[in-house]
Image (spheres, rainbow, N blue to C red):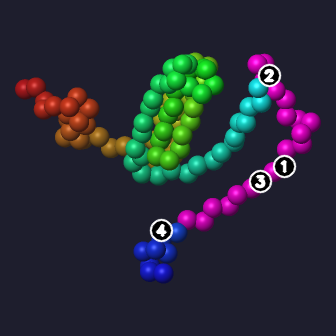
Amino acid sequence: MTDTEKKATVTVQRRVRRIPASTIRPDRAGQFRHDVAAQAVVAGNQDIKVLAVSACASGNGKGHIAVRVGRILVYVEDRDALNAFRDAWSRATDLADSAFGPLWVTPQSETAARIRRDGGAPIC
């Protein structure tokens, strides 16, 4: 194994816990949900994809929004869940300076960011 391969190796610890059958209950529609709690650590720029799936196209007959950030995929099934994620990311954004340090913005970098965002050259 080369040094590069050693650096690329990732160790994952898995903790599996048995859930007693008496605690598993069907939801209102009588269907059993398999919700999963997960933790992910991400760094660097991540590719994203967001897709709305209509009720007719979904497997369960309910519309949802699929949000993929890097290798993390989240299915959002209603507006309450969407609002919860939006609020959480808004709070995380408010904490960014204290967690990662301030983002220094120069007039040149601000103009470059505006050009990238708007997809064109600045209007003079």
Using the image, tell me which numbered label, if any, was put on residue 8.
4
Task: Say which label, 2 or 1, has the lower sequence index.
Answer: 1
Amino acid type, residue under disc 2 in the picture: Gly
Q: Comparing marks 2 and 1, which lies closer to the viewer?
A: 2
Amino acid type, residue under disc 3 in the picture: Val
Span of residues in magenta: 10-29
Residue 115: x percent and y percent?
20, 34
Amino acid type, residue under disc 4 in the picture: Ala
Magenta-drawn stretch contains 68: no
Q: Residue at x 33, y 44 (%)?
A: 104
Whether the residues at callouts 3 and 1 have beta carbons within 8 Å, the answer is yes
Furthest-bottom residue in this view: 1
Left or right, 46 with respect to 18, comes to left
Task: Say which label, 3 or 4, has the lower sequence index.
Answer: 4
Q: Residue at x 76, y 19 (%)?
A: 29
Task: Say which label, 4 or 1, has the lower sequence index.
Answer: 4
Residue 114: x percent and y percent?
23, 32
Using the image, tell me which numbered label, if any, was put on residue 45.
none
Using the image, tell me which numbered label, if any, was put on residue 16.
3
Q: Is residue 3 placed above or below 29 in the rendered structure?
A: below
Using the image, tell me which numbered label, if any, was put on residue 30.
2
Q: Tag 3: Cα neighbours inside 10 Å, few (<14), some, or many (≥20)?
A: few
**Residue under label 1:** 18
- For the stretch drawn in magenta, the main secondary structure is loop
C-alpha distance separating marks 4 and 1? 32 Å
The quarter holding residue 111 reads: top left
Q: Secondary structure at mark 2?
A: loop
